[in-house]
Amino acid sequence: MEHLTSMRECGIEGVDQLLWVTADSGGYGDRTDGPLFDWIQDSKHFMSHVKGFDTVIQAGGNCGMYPRFYRNYFNNVYTFEPDDLNYYCLDQNCQGEGFHKFKGGLGNTTEKFAIRKPNDTNVGMHYIVDTPGKVQMYRIDDLELEQCDLIHLDIEGYESKALAGGLKTIEKFKPVIVTERAIGAEVIIPMGYEMIQRMRMDALFVYKE
């Protein structure tokens, strides 16, 4: 897979470069648009509500940008990425203790489902479909975590199912939750959460004390 990847300049969070899919033009972004821009603009908003920094769950892992950044703050970073090439980059970018990397999807089942790749130039747009396939699915509750402080999901419309697979964990630890386009609100609002901020792409939910 080395011939399909190359290094890209980063320059934030103490990360000089990240290994990335060479053909990608949308899943990385820059300081004015895309995932890198969203992190620069938005991370301070949801991080300010996090009360502990032991464990974060992040999906999709993409090529490892967000999990790499999160390791600067959290002792344990659990990240999930179903695409082989994306995961290759993620694995290379996220080395060392504290990273818990899963080559698969996050949902409410442990079956194997299919992955769709609608755009080869945006590796962040791959998504899971509920038909038999080769992607191993995982459930948050099956991780049996000792702590969970933040859940950050950007999984192309699959957020509700990922949250449904973590109801026990969410009920126990009441982590701050971030989802793309507020998907999954119908799962966590009945549990006592409220959406307190809409960002460019994401929504921030916190448990009402």
Image (spheres, rainbow, N blue to C red):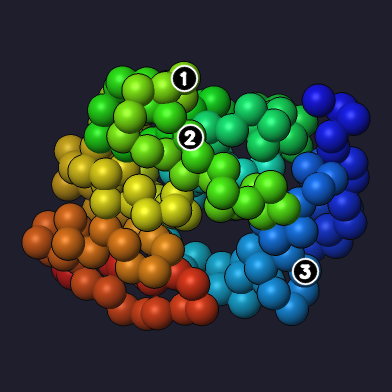
Question: At 12% from the left edge and 57% from the top edge, which residue is drawn?
Answer: 191
Return the x and y of residue 83 as percentages of the image width and height. Answer: 59, 33
Give the mark toward the camera: 1 or 3: 1
Q: Amino acid at mark 1?
A: Lys
> Which residue is disc 1 drawn over?
134
The numbered dot on residue 115 is: 2
Of 114 and 174, the residue lying toward us: 114
Identify the image quadrant of residue 202.
Answer: bottom left
Question: Is 105 left or right of 103, judged from the image as shown?
Answer: left
Position of residue 151 relative to residue 104, above or below, is below
Report, in whole angstroms, how far the alpha carbon at label 1 lies from the one at label 2. 8 Å
Kind of element beneath mark 1:
loop
Question: At 54% from the left edge and 26% from the top edge, which residue is drawn?
Answer: 103
Kind of element beneath mark 2:
strand
Question: Is 202 left or right of 145, judged from the image as shown?
Answer: right
Question: Is 91 left or right of 149, judged from the image as shown?
Answer: right
Of 196 and 109, the residue lying toward us: 109
Q: Amino acid at mark 2?
A: Ile
Instruction: Determine whether label 1 and label 2 are within 8 Å by CB.
Output: yes
